[in-house]
Amino acid sequence: MDNHNPTDRAKILIEELKILQGVINRMAQNSLECKKMDTRARCGFLIP
């Protein structure tokens, strides 16, 4: 069925996990930036 040996599969899996980790890191960073902007906006409305 597959022509990949276990070593090739492991390398492919590691690369896929690196890609997913990058996506998760970007999502976490974007979430943090949104929270920072929200906090600044709320403080701006409270302090005239």
Image (cartoon, rainbow, N blue to C red):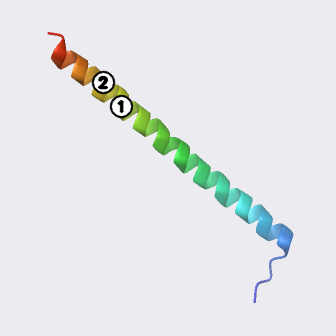
Looking at the rendered image, the quarter that the N terminus falls into is bottom right
Tell me: residue 21, above or below residue 29.
below
Neighbourhood count class around disc 1 (C-alpha, 10 Å): few under 14, some 14–19, many 20 upward: few
Question: Which residue is label 2 attached to?
Answer: 39
- Relative placement, left or right, of 13 versus 39 is right
Looking at the rendered image, the quarter that the C terminus falls into is top left
Along the line of sight, the residue nearer the viewer: 25 or 8: 25
Locate residue 44, reporting x and y percent. 21, 16
Locate residue 33, reporting x and y percent. 40, 31
Q: Amino acid at mark 1?
A: Lys
The image quadrant of residue 12 is: bottom right
Mark 1 and mark 2 in contact? Answer it, CB < 8 Å.
yes
- Relative placement, left or right, of 23 versus 34 is right
x 61%, y 54%: residue? 19
Locate residue 3, reporting x and y percent. 80, 82
Q: Amino acid at mark 2?
A: Thr
x 17%, y 15%: residue? 46
x 79%, y 65%: residue? 10
Q: In the image as oriented, which residue stretches furthest toward the left? A: 48
Look at the numbered disc 1 and give the secondary structure of its residue: helix
Look at the numbered disc 2 and give the secondary structure of its residue: helix
Question: Which residue is label 1 attached to?
Answer: 35
Tell me: residue 23, above or below residue 3.
above
